[in-house]
Amino acid sequence: MGRPIFIDRDGVINVDPIGDYVKRWEDFRFEAGALEALKTITDLGFEIILISNQAGIGDGVYPESALWDIQRHMLDVFDRAGIRIRASHYCLHGKQAGCKCRKPEIGLFQEAVRGLSYDPGATFFIGDKATDMEAGRRFGIRTIMVRTGHGALDETHLEDAIRPDFIVDTLKDAAALLASL
Ligand SMILES: [Mg+2]
Ligand SMILES: [Zn+2]
């Protein structure tokens, strides 16, 4: 494959309703500049893989059908904007399920690259939470933290072991950073 890049959804691409979940498309709001950023990342030749925890499904807060409805609408918008998404990997388990895919576990990443060859040193995970930075680090790739979503708060209590390679304000800034590397 080309060069994969892993990107979290809530708090990075769309506004994370902190303390709640995105339960339906009507509540889904793109972060400012996110579409432009994803277009830039597409045009840089990255294969975008979405990696997202959706514990609200396992915990019974919203049905799985809502996730796929949101996904369909989101991909429609991406299509119209010239954004290509190679794959989306979601953990649907509840927070206490003890699964191997809920970040900071790395099951979703492993699933995404199964059977593919790629250069771990040339890829990144862009996320907003400390647990995203932990997952990316565990998976052995570089990490970029954005200050949207939980980022501004989580940035203040990062342990050294999970400190991101880069911290930027928004996904748009992350795209500009990738373009400059
Ligand atoms: Mg997030
Ligand atoms: Zn899971």
Image (cartoon, rainbow, N blue to C red):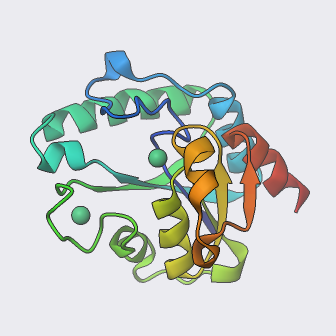
Position in image of residue 53 (x %, y %): 33, 53
Position in image of residue 129 (x %, y %): 51, 53
* Left-right relation of 95 to 168: left
**What is the residue that sits farthest to the left in this orientation?**
60
- Residue at the image position 45 percent from the left and 40 percent from the top: 10
- Residue at the image position 20 percent from the left and 42 percent from the top: 56
Q: Tell me: residue 76, above or below residue 125.
A: above
Position in image of residue 141 (x %, y %): 61, 76
Asked whether 142 or 116 is in front, the reply is 142
Asked whether 2 or 171 is in front, the reply is 171
Q: Tell me: residue 43, above or below residue 130.
A: above
Position in image of residue 111 (x %, y %): 35, 73
**What is the residue that sits farthest to the top in this orientation?**
26
Which quarter is ligand 2 in? Answer: bottom left
Figure quadrant of the N terminus: bottom right
- Residue at the image position 58 percent from the left and 71 percent from the top: 159
Q: Quadrant of residue 181?
A: bottom right
Q: Quadrant of residue 5?
A: bottom right
Asked whether 163 or 15 is in front, the reply is 163
* Left-right relation of 58 to 16: left
* Left-right relation of 67 to 1: left
- Residue at the image position 65 percent from the left and 41 percent from the top: 38
**What is the residue that sits farthest to the right in this orientation?**
180
Residue 2, visible in the rendered structure: no
Q: How many dots with numbers? A: 0
Asked whether 68 or 156 is in front, the reply is 156
Residue 23, visible in the rendered structure: yes
* Left-right relation of 42 to 26: right
